[in-house]
Amino acid sequence: MNVAITGAGKGIGLELVRFFLHAGARVWACSRNVSALESIKNDRLTVRSLDLTDVAEADIYNSVAAHLDELDILVHNAAILMNQPFLETPLDIWRQTFETNVFSAVKVSRALIPLLKKSRTPHIVHIGSMGGFQGSSKFPGLSAYSASKATLANITECMAEELKNDGIHVNCLALGAVDTEMLRTAFPGYQAPVSSEDMARFIGEFSINQRSLFNGKIIPVSSSTP
C-alpha cells in the first residue's frame, strides 16, 4: 500500500503518518515544517518540506514518483484557519486560505492522478470540516475557512464524477472538533472531545476499508458542535 499525505507536520496529519506506517504502508508526507516528521525513523517514510502554494505540479509528481511507482491513497490534510470577523478579514487572508485549503488540493490531485491510475483501488480523501457542511452550525470569524471547506466538498463531488471511469474514488470527511493546535488557536479554552490520534485512526481505516462503499460523498464525522 502506497500513501501520500499533505499537511503531515503535526496534528491529524502526523498521526496519519504513524497510522499508515503501522499498517505497513509506504508513505510520502509533506509539510512546511517537517521537524516532527523527521523524528520518525522508518525506511518506508519519505518526508518533503514543501509549501504547496508555491510549487509546480511537475515537481510534486517527480517527488512522489521518485519513491512510489503507484499511489493507492491520497489524503489532502493541508489547511490553515484564521479566526477573524467577516468585515475585518482582508482579501489577502481569503486568498491565502483558498490557496492552501482548496487550490493546493487541486494541484496535488492533478499532479498525482497518473500514479493513482496505476492502483487497483485508488482513493482520494479530502479532509473537510463541519464548517463547510451545508446546514451545519456556523461560527463567527470562520467565514473564509468554512467557505474554503465548502468549496472542497463540492470539488469532491465533481472530481468523483470526472474520475469514475479511471476507478478513482474521491470522498470528503467533514470533521467536527478535534484536539489540534489549529482548533485551539481558533477556539481558545475549548476542549475538543476527540484526539488527533483517534481521528487519524478513523480517517486511515476509512481510506483503506471504505473506498468500495463511498464515492463522491461528503461525510460528517462529528460528535459535537463545533
Image (cartoon, rainbow, N blue to C red):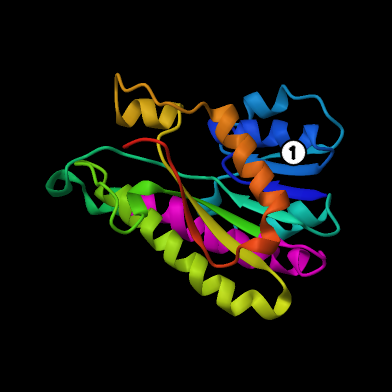
Q: Is residue 221 left or right of residue 41?
A: left
Residue at 77% x, 62% y is 121
Q: Which residue is mark 1?
A: 20
Three-letter amino acid code of the residue under disc 1: Phe
Q: Is residue 16 left or right of residue 101?
A: right
The x, y position of residue 125, in whole percent, is 59, 55
**What residue lies at 59% left-to-right and 79% top-to-bottom?**
162
Place residue 170 in its image quadrant.
bottom right
Q: Residue at x 38, y 31 (%)?
A: 183
Is residue 10 at least partly visible in the picture? Answer: no
Residue 56: which quarter of the image? bottom right
Look at the picture and state if 28 lies above or below 112.
Answer: above
**Above or below 106: residue 161:** below
Q: Magenta part of the protein: which range?
A: 95-123
* Secondary structure that dominates the magenta span: helix
Position of residue 59 measured from the top left corner of the image (x, y, whole percent)? 68, 57
Is residue 77 at all visible to an observer of this figure?
A: yes
